[in-house]
Image (spheres, rainbow, N blue to C red):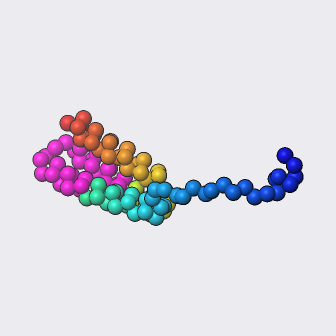
Amino acid sequence: MSASDQDEPVDTPIPERTGLTPRQARGISVAVASLLLAAMATVLAIRLGERTSVLVVGVYGLAMIVCGLVIELSRNGRTRLATWLLAADVVAAVCGDWLLP
């Protein structure tokens, strides 16, 4: 390669961005976490009416707290972390409800 070859601009096409914008991803994450928070509050109310174990009530209470944390993380731009945390939270809440007496 000569020096003149290095000075020439390379016409590489810039690929168009596909997928969601960061703002859209944050909005979706907040919406999903809010819906799950409301759903867990409903399940918690049902479980309280059934007189189930205090551990199950604690699991749903903790899951609701984590949903609030996910909403705050998403609002502050930590959407990927919030998404993983929300997925782990839902799995833990369902497993806790299923496994605990």
- The residues colored magenta run 39-67
Residue 11: x and y in percent read 69, 57
**Residue at horizontal 66 percent and vertical 55 percent from the top:** 12
**Residue at horizontal 12 percent and vertical 51 percent from the top:** 49
Q: Which of these two is toward me, 1 or 86?
A: 1
Occupied quadrant, residue 75: bottom left
Occupied quadrant, residue 74: bottom left
Residue 87: x and y in percent read 37, 46
| Image quarter hosting the C terminus | top left
Total labels drawn: 0
Q: Which of these two is toward me, 42 or 22?
A: 22
User: Is residue 101 shown in magenta?
Assistant: no
**Residue at horizontal 28 percent and vertical 38 percent from the top:** 95
Residue 98 visible within the image: yes
Residue, far right = 3
User: Is residue 44 shown in magenta?
Assistant: yes
Q: Which of these two is toward me, 29 or 17?
A: 17
